[in-house]
Amino acid sequence: QVQLVESGGGLVQTGGSLRLSCEASVNVSSVDKMGWFRRPPGKQRDVIAIITEGGRTHYVDSVKGRFTISTDGAKNTVTLQMDDLKPEDTAVYYCNLFPPPPHSWGQGTQVVVSS
């Protein structure tokens, strides 16, 4: 069963940046797809960014142009660089395989963007 540990969240002002990191117990460079997900307050968890084994990336429209997903196979980490943050980016952020296996979620990392 994959184990995932997210870190890097915090409180930031509108327009600021954060860099989230996820340590995985699998070789992230050989997984078909890895993704970052988020759960805003009172809402469901949804995928926001995906990176394929070949390095192709996909983003939902709300983060396109502001967020960048990447992997480091040597460190088994998945990173999410978040720039130009907005209050609506406030959420708990998670990484996982895509699609996520059952019962595989880490604890997530909280991001709060103040206006």
Image (tube, rainbow, N blue to C red):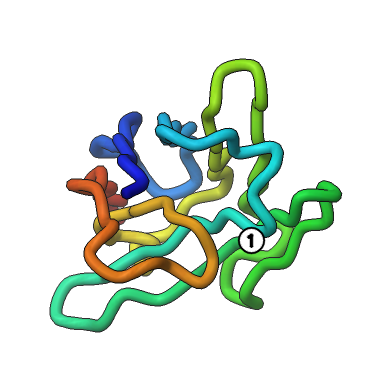
> Where the C terminus falls, by quadrant?
bottom left
Q: In the image, what residue occupies the spot 51% across and 72% down?
A: 99
Name the amino acid type tagged 1: Ile
Q: Residue furthest front?
A: 1
69, 85: nearer the viewer: 69
The residue located at (62%, 75%) in the rendering is 60
Q: Foreground: 47 or 40?
A: 47
Q: Left of 24 or right of it: where is 72? A: right
Query: In x, y percent, where is residue 87?
Result: 34, 62
Q: Residue at x 70, y 42 (%)?
A: 30
Residue 69 placement (x, y as % from top left): 64, 46
Q: Quadrant of residue 42?
A: bottom left
Give me the residue at 65% from left, 35% from top: 71
Left or right, 87 with respect to 69, comes to: left
Above or below for 46 versus 114: below
Q: Which x, y percent locates residue 61?
A: 65, 77
Image position of 63 with respect to 55: above or below: below
**Where is residue 32 drawn, in percent x and y?**
69, 57
In the figure, 68 relative to 102: above or below? Answer: above
Mark 1 surroundings within 10 Å by alpha-carbon count, few (fewer than 14), some (14 through 19), many (20 or more): many
Question: Can you tell which quarter of the image residue 35 is in?
Answer: bottom right
Q: Circle 1 is placed at which residue position?
A: 50
Q: Which residue in the rendered view is the most extreme toward the top?
A: 74
Report whether 74 appears left or right of 11. Answer: right
Left or right of 111, for residue 69 = right
